[in-house]
Image (tube, grey):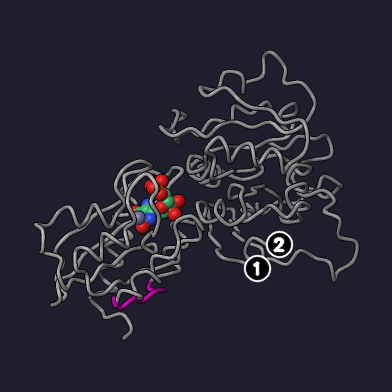
């Protein structure tokens, strides 16, 4: 039996509940329990590492026995491991849940297998309900699980002819205020902002996420500087509330270190050389390209050499969104095959 309308609605609710949890080393997960008649009898969400999982949080809302015959709607496959908390698959079985509907499989080898465990015990299990939405919610956590590195967004602003600076190197304010405000909103979603030493020395960016009135947004990503050149003593980034980290080389090692610091979402604003290095190393999951209706001509391209010499080697992307921001355009694109540019 595929999922019912009530189950779809409950999954939507579970996704909203998941968002109440913090973004951190653990995924954001939501759960809703439906009575056999399809009424919501309990809700729960995961409140971060070390706290009960969403399913257990929902079950704890009920008197013992009240979940017998119920359907559990969960945004992630119930776990099957003894981690910081007991396995959710066992908790659901003990509570007498008859049916489990979840959105996406748990990619973590240490905790996956809950679906099989439940089926083996005679529980009906459905998966894939609102899977796209659950993927979108967990994209950075899924990237860390699958690829062992943070999810990477590479952003640049360019003119209509693909230039990011004028011949003299000046590059600030290619796009207008609405596009810049959009960048700040998206920066604030990231755990780290990356720039190269070239951009740092040329623009002296503060690398803070700010509101339209210039005030600091509550969530600040960690500033990351890539490259060997020294950060000047009076650089604006030195006044960042979180300080900054610098990696002289090896992008892979930098991303692994950032992952180990709990960074799941990296926002690369680095300039044409840094952007190109992420593309060359195939570690860019999403591109945000802000396009201003202006022309600069010349050689100051938005992206340096990415190792493509022939058209057949072009890095093909899928356009996932187009937005108009004032006079500018935002194009959002991802590698044609996820995680494998
Ligand atoms: C679920 N429901 O609500 C969550 C799950 O450190 P632990 O013990 O909390 O385990 C974390 C792992 O459990 C995490 O990496 C992911 O695979 C799964 N998270 N599973 O059934 C939940 N948050
Ligand atoms: Zn669990």
Image: 310 above or below 231? below
Q: Secondary structure at mark 2?
A: loop
x%, y% of residue 225?
68, 31
Residue at 33 percent of width and 47 percent of height? 85
Q: Residues within 10 Å of mark 1 (few under 14, many from 20)?
A: few
Looking at the rendering, in which quadrant would you find the C terminus? bottom right
Can residue 229 be found in the magenta stretch? no
User: Magenta segment: does it hold 127?
Assistant: yes
Location of mark 1 (residue): 337
| Front position in the image: 169 or 49 | 49
Horizontal and vertical percent position of residue 323: 53, 60
Q: Which residues are magenta?
A: 122-129
- Quadrant housing residue 37: bottom left
What is the C-alpha distance between the residues marked 2 and 1?
6 Å
State the residue at coordinates (26%, 59%): 91
Residue tagged by mark 2? Answer: 341
Q: Is residue 12 left or right of residue 289?
A: left
Q: Quadrant of residue 114?
A: bottom left
State yes or no: Cβ of the residue under disc 1 lies below 8 Å from any atom of ligand 1.
Answer: no
Q: Toward the viewer: 218 or 24?
A: 24
Q: Quadrant of the N terminus?
A: bottom left
* Residue drawn at point x = 50 percent, y = 52 percent: 141
Badge count: 2
Using the image, tell me which numbered label, if any, was put on residue 177: none
Residue 127 drawn at (x, y percent) = 39, 74
**Residue positioned 52% across, 52% down in the render:** 140
Classify 269 as above or below 6: above
Q: 63 or 130: which is nearer to us?
A: 63
Q: Tell me where residue 155 appears, x and y as whole percent.
A: 64, 48
Quick check: marks 2 and 1 in contact, CB under 8 Å?
yes
């Amino acid at each position: 039996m595929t999922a019912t309308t009530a189950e779809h609605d409950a999954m939507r609710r579970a996704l909203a509940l998941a968002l109440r949890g913090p973004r951190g080393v653990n995924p954001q997960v939501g759960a809703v329990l439906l009575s056999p008649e399809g009424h919501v009898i309990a809700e729960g969400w995961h409140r971060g590492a070390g706290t009960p999982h969403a399913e257990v949080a929902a079950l704890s809302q009920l008197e013992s026995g009240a979940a017998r015959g119920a359907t559990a709607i969960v945004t992630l496959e119930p776990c099957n491991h003894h981690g910081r908390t007991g396995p959710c698959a066992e908790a659901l079985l003990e509570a007498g849940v008859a049916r489990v509907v979840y959105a996406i499989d748990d990619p973590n080898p240490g905790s996956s297998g809950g679906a099989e465990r439940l089926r083996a015990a005679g529980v009906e299990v459905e998966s894939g309900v609102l899977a796209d939405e659950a993927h979108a919610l967990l994209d950075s956590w899924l990237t860390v699980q699958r690829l062992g590195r943070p999810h990477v967004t590479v952003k640049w602003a360019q003119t209509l002819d693909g230039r990011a600076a004028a011949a003299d190197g000046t590059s600030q304010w290619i796009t207008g205020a609405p596009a810049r405000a959009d960048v700040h909103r998206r920066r604030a979603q990231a755990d780290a902002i990356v720039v190269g030493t070239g951009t740092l020395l040329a623009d002296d960016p503060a690398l803070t996420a700010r509101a339209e009135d210039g005030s600091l947004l509550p969530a600040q990503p960690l500033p990351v500087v890539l490259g060997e050149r020294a950060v000047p003593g009076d650089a604006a980034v030195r006044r960042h509330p979180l300080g900054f980290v610098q990696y002289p080389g090896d992008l892979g090692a930098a991303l692994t270190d950032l992952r180990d610091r709990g960074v799941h979402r990296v926002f690369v604003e680095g300039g044409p050389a840094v952007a190109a290095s992420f593309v060359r190393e195939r570690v860019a999951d999403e591109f945000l390209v802000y396009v201003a209706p202006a022309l600069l001509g010349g050689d100051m391209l938005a992206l340096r050499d990415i190792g493509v010499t022939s058209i057949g080697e072009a890095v093909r992307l899928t356009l996932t969104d187009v937005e108009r921001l004032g006079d500018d355009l935002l194009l959002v694109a991802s590698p044609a095959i996820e995680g494998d540019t």
